[in-house]
């Protein structure tokens, strides 16, 4: 899980071009939207694309998306839950 | 053209150092790559970092030039925002198209799609300025900026006190290559400062973002007045000559879009014959050729009228002005198809 969260942070920084942010600046549990990284609705769409391209997971329900994209921790938990046992 | 409108503020990002500093002391930037690329300013004073990270070049150049223009005009709210672009954000368009192929039309990033739409720059200006007035972008190849200008002039004649009018264009390596395949650019490298002496098929590519605040009344700060405006699509030489002769006989200076392209040089020879003895300044060695290069020519003409001098390093072929310039005729065409004439007057 720790390895996945580190990789996710790097992927988020690259996908959203967060030029002045380093992986260690992103707290696992900090909210990604509003406060925290201060992402917006277009970023949420970019993160959906990231999940689809990098992890082959398609989020169909937008309400589910809100919960999944809450933080790096929630994203990592969701990805882990979708991986085959 | 009924009445006049006035250039109250302006800003240009171009291959020359036009964004900051004194253009009359600026050196001439030239290249032998057949592609004049813009000198990009530091965007951070104009665009918040969180917005900047998502923008590609054209968007940053367009938005920054627009904001600098608003600052320069001293007008707090831009009012109607009217722009022209031939191609919009090519970087975003190319990225979006490549991803369609790469990901087989699935999982496409929204950002390049959104930003590849032509009205993105206008939208960003309006959002940043909290401006809900009329907002329009014209995309008509070599008439893009000119249609934005025409719309602005009509808005002013209908009662708007001012408009923000501009143009933005970028060239990418991919687009440069595509246009080289259809013979738009010279086949051998040419130094941009010698482009007029190298008369052969094709010209040199360029790009730029230029904005103007146009007003209905002159102020002591006004750069110039626009008092005449004509557009002609694929005119015959006879039609062009008649229009040029009727258009302006009082020009002290001609600014023209001559670009060393032998395929379309004959139009400029028609212009030469209409204005014998009138000093002439070609400007494509400064900005290259692109759909909205006319905006750069207008910017240059307005500066010359206001300052009553030439940027000396940019025009080694022309001696400094010996008499006051009261009226400038501007004539440009885009690969022989879209022809534009403007009359500028000193305020």
Image (spheres, rainbow, N blue to C red):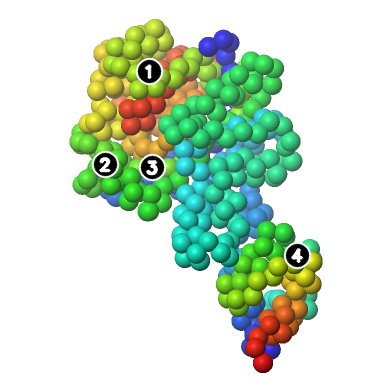
Which residue does the image show at 58% across and 50% down from the upper left?
B115
Residue to which mark 3 is pinned: B206
Name the image quarter holding the N terminus of chain A: bottom right
The answer to whether residue B282 is seen in the rendering is no
Identify the image quadrant of residue B297.
top left
Q: In the drawing, what numbered circle is on residue B236? A: none
Between the C-alphas of marks 3 and 4, the distance is 44 Å
**Chain of the residue that carries numbered disc 2 in the rendered image:** B
Callout 4 secondary element:
helix
- In the image, which is nearer the foreground, mark 1 or mark 2? 2
Which residue does the image show at 50% across and 31% down from the upper left?
B145
**Chain of the residue that carries numbered disc 3 in the rendered image:** B
Residue to which mark 1 is pinned: B253
The answer to whether residue B228 is seen in the rendering is yes
- In the rendered view, tell whether residue A39 sits above or below residue A27: above
Residue to which mark 2 is pinned: B183
Report the side of B340 relative to A74 (left or right). left
- Residue B122 x/y as whole percent: 62, 40
Callout 2 secondary element:
loop
- Residue A43 x/y as whole percent: 67, 62
- Indicate which disc, 2 or 3, sits on the residue closer to the N terminus: 2
Q: Are marks 3 and 4 on the same chain?
A: no
Residue to which mark 4 is pinned: A62
Question: Are discs 4 and 2 less than 8 Å apart at CB?
Answer: no
Structural crowding at the residue carrying mark 2, measured as other residues with C-alpha within 10 Å and reported as few (<14), some (14–19) or many (≥20):
few
Structural crowding at the residue carrying mark 3, measured as other residues with C-alpha within 10 Å and reported as few (<14), some (14–19) or many (≥20):
many
Which residue does the image show at 36% across and 37% down from the upper left?
B289
- In the image, which is nearer the foreground, mark 1 or mark 4? 4
- Residue B326 x/y as whole percent: 46, 14
- Residue A17 x/y as whole percent: 59, 65
């Amino acid at each position: 899980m720790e390895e996945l969260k580190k990789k996710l942070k790097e992927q988020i920084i690259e996908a959203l071009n967060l030029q002045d942010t380093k992986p260690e600046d992103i707290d696992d549990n900090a909210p990604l939207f509003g406060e925290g990284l201060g992402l917006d609705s277009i970023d949420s769409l970019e993160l959906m694309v990231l999940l689809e391209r990098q992890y082959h997971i398609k989020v169909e329900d937008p309400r589910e998306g809100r919960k999944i994209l809450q933080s790096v921790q929630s994203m990592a938990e969701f990805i882990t839950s979708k991986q085959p046992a | 053209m009924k009445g006049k409108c006035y250039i109250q503020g302006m800003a240009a990002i171009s291959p020359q150092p036009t964004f900051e500093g004194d253009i009359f002391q600026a050196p001439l930037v030239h290249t032998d790559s057949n592609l004049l690329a813009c000198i990009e300013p530091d965007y951070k004073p104009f665009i918040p970092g969180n917005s900047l990270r998502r923008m590609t070049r054209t968007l940053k150049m367009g938005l920054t030039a627009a904001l600098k223009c608003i600052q320069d005009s001293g007008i707090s709210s831009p009012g109607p925002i009217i722009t022209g672009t031939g191609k919009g954000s090519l970087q975003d368009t190319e990225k979006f198209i490549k991803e369609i192929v790469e990901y087989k039309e699935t999982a496409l990033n929204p950002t390049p799609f959104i930003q590849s739409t032509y009205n993105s720059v206008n939208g960003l200006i309006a959002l940043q300025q909290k401006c809900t007035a009329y907002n329009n972008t014209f995309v008509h190849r070599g008439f893009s900026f000119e249609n934005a200008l025409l719309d602005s002039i009509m808005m002013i004649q209908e009662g708007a006190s001012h408009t923000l009018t501009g143009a933005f264009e970028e060239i990418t390596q991919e687009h440069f290559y595509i246009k080289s395949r259809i013979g738009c650019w010279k086949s051998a490298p040419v130094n941009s400062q010698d482009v007029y002496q190298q008369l052969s098929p094709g010209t040199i590519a360029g790009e730029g973002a230029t904005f103007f605040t146009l007003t209905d009344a002159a102020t002591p700060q006004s750069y110039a007045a626009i008092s005449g405006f004509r557009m002609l699509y694929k005119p015959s030489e006879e039609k062009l000559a008649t229009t040029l002769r009727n258009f302006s006989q009082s020009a002290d200076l001609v600014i023209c879009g001559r670009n060393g392209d032998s395929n379309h040089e004959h139009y400029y020879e028609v212009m030469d014959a209409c204005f014998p003895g009138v000093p002439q300044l070609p400007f494509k060695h400064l900005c290259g050729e692109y759909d909205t290069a006319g905006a750069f020519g207008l910017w240059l003409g307005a500066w010359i009228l206001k300052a009553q001098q030439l940027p000396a390093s940019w025009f080694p072929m022309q001696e400094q002005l010996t008499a006051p310039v009261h009226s400038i005729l501007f004539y440009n065409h885009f690969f022989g198809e879209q022809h534009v004439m403007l009359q500028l007057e000193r305020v």
